[in-house]
Amino acid sequence: MNLAAGDVIIMARGLKRYYQRGIETVKALDGVDMDLRIGEMVSILGPSGSGKTTLVNLLSCLDAPTGGTLKVAGREVLGLPEDELAGVRRGVMGFVFQKFYLLPTLTVAENVELPLLFCRRAADRAATMAVLGQVGLEDRASHFPRELSGGQMQRVAIARALVIEPRILIADEPTGNLDSQNGEAIFALFRSLVTSRALTLVVTTHNLALGYRSDRVLILQDGRIVKEEPGRPAPPTC
Amino acid sequence: MRFMSLAVKNLLRRPMRSVLTVVGVGLAVAVTVSLSGFILGYKHAINESIDKLGFQVMIMAKGCPYEAATMMLKGGTGLLYLPEDVYDQVRKDPAVESITPVFIGVAEKEAGGIAETASTSFTIVTGIEAATFAAMKPWLALATGPGYDGGRWFLPDAEDEIVMGYEAATYEQRKVGDAFYLSIVPSGRTEPVMRTFKVTGVLARTGSQDDGTVFMPYRTAQKVFGRPGRLTIVGIKLKDFAGPMVAEFSERWVKLPEVQVVGLEQVKSTLVMLVSAAQVMLSAVAVIAVIVATIGVVNTILMSVYERTGEIGIMKAIGASRSDVFQLIWLETLAVCALGAVAGCAAAFLGSRLVERGILALLDIGIHGSIVRITPTVLGAAVAGTIVVGFFAGLYPAWRAASMRPVEAIREGIE
């Protein structure tokens, strides 16, 4: 992928996602236009049911759109089967979710290296330690998730997302299970990663204060972007 | 990290559940291996025991040939007798290579053996012609060593000399030169007669029923048991044991009144066939055990898949393909089955002696030697068979996991 900072890496036009519930058609997303550029951090805000998670699922190719156009790194993904969507994600996108989903029988280092197994890439312990160092957990490499706090587990999840050196990081409610102090720390970490790695970061959150720490804020309502504003990013602290 | 190590580590999430599932598989494998070992061992023991009779054909009093063969293997009461002149007639048959007369009786003995109780017990007394009997059984030898040196076979006409089988002598704590007492009820009388014999020799262990027998000259046995001119069996080896010779021989002598001709190969094959019939029933038990264990494995892995729905969604999100997820779950199933197979084989192998003692204690089957044979082939077949079962048992849970859509799986995990 030969893209430079500022280039569009994800482009959506008229993006739709409809669900059929009996005879009723639910329009979870009803025509979204947006561009995501290399090296920018974008927050998606909105009330529950506004379509934030649906939009993020489509942008991350975890789900397929019902209509519209969606291009990831120049490739149209509309109509692709699940295995091909997985191929689009693999090696390009990293994910962080509200629930950390760390495997309890693997150490921190092994959890971080898990995506490499699925990408058929050899684990490099030095690189793993470097990623853990970026999230401030290099001294916890041999610990198990049960020995970590919530904030530490989320940082391990972030390290796991970063180990494949993605171009895009998708974070869906990453601070939902954390207290405010840990939430602040996570967003600060996101900011520094976007800067240091030229990542494209898309984050959904209910927390307005944290959400406005991004470069751009998209506000969703009833499946549509109703407002787009610049954010108020704080300078990186780590 | 490889898929196999990840699969094994996933099993450690619920160690007790995994252990119980492995134990279930292990029990099924142990049952199957033990039953297979018993069938193999029993067939082998039948063959060996009958071979150690030394005869190819027996002529005996009319009755059930299989009961007669079992009597020869076990020793026992309810004996029938045939006239001695049958022996005189048959020995002239040109087809006969060697022949020996045998008289069997059952005597009481005063306890004085290792148990040292005051109660009486029984002993099998076999009257033989030492020279021809030993010729039929070339593996028979007199024991040597302290207490046994100087042993010899009794003289043909000796009326107070015996040779004891190894286990009989050991149990009775008798050595060469010791006295041995038998209480015998002669035919036609009701009161026992106490007889004293001198032990002239002790046989080395043979692993057959001869080890528990007391031998004396057959004419002496006829006299003390009050059956002059009677024999229990005539043991025969033919010059040519193959093909029609046996049938022709049998036809010649079956015409004699009161006698039957029993070919021991026929007895052997019939007993083995009976065991094979039992094998079918025992196999049904093993199959049921395997089915129950397989259901347990499928249930355990399916529960594990449902518990890890969100995690499976995340694995798909971070790059796992359908085949990756399928492989992971399927390997977990194979790991459980493989561990269970190894544990079951080890338990069956280590417990085989206990199983054998239990069977011999419950059933007096007249077989000497080991009756449980757990061979490397049996173990290998058990492990391979379990892995094949695991191969199929894992298909549905693996397909279930691989079919999950990542979005729905992650959503279910959050809810």
Image (spheres, coloured by chain):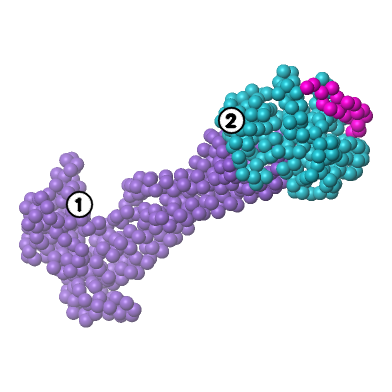
Chain colours: A cyan, B purple
User: Which is more toward the observer, B270 or A104?
Assistant: A104
**What segment carries the magenta color?**
A214-235
Residue B214 in picture, x, y percent from top left: 16, 56
The chain letter under disc 2 is A
Snapshot quadrant of residue B74:
bottom left
- Which part of the image, by quadrant, shows the N terminus of chain B? top right
Q: Secondary structure at mark 1?
A: helix
Does the rendering let one see residue B63? Answer: yes
On the same chain: label 1 and label 2? no
The chain letter under disc 1 is B
Snapshot quadrant of residue A152:
top right
- The answer to whether residue B141 is left or right of residue A96 is left
Check disc 1 and give the amino acid type.
Glu
Residue A18 in picture, x, y percent from top left: 88, 40
User: Which is more toward the observer, B363 or B40?
Assistant: B40
Residue at 67% over, 37% down: A163
Residue at 53% over, 51% down: B387
User: Which is more toward the observer, B152 or B341?
Assistant: B341
Q: Is residue B341 magenta?
A: no
Residue at 71% over, 23% down: A238
Residue at 82% over, 26% down: A214
Q: Which residue is mark 1?
A: B167
Does the rendering let one see residue B305? Answer: no
Check disc 2 and give the amino acid type.
Ala
Disc 1 from disc 2: Cα separation: 68 Å
Q: Taking B198 as reference, is A37 above or below it? A: above
Binning the other alpha carbons within 10 Å of mark 2 as few (below 14), some (14 to 19) or many (20 upward) gives some
Q: Taking B293 as reference, is B233 above or below it? A: below
Q: Which residue is mark 2?
A: A141
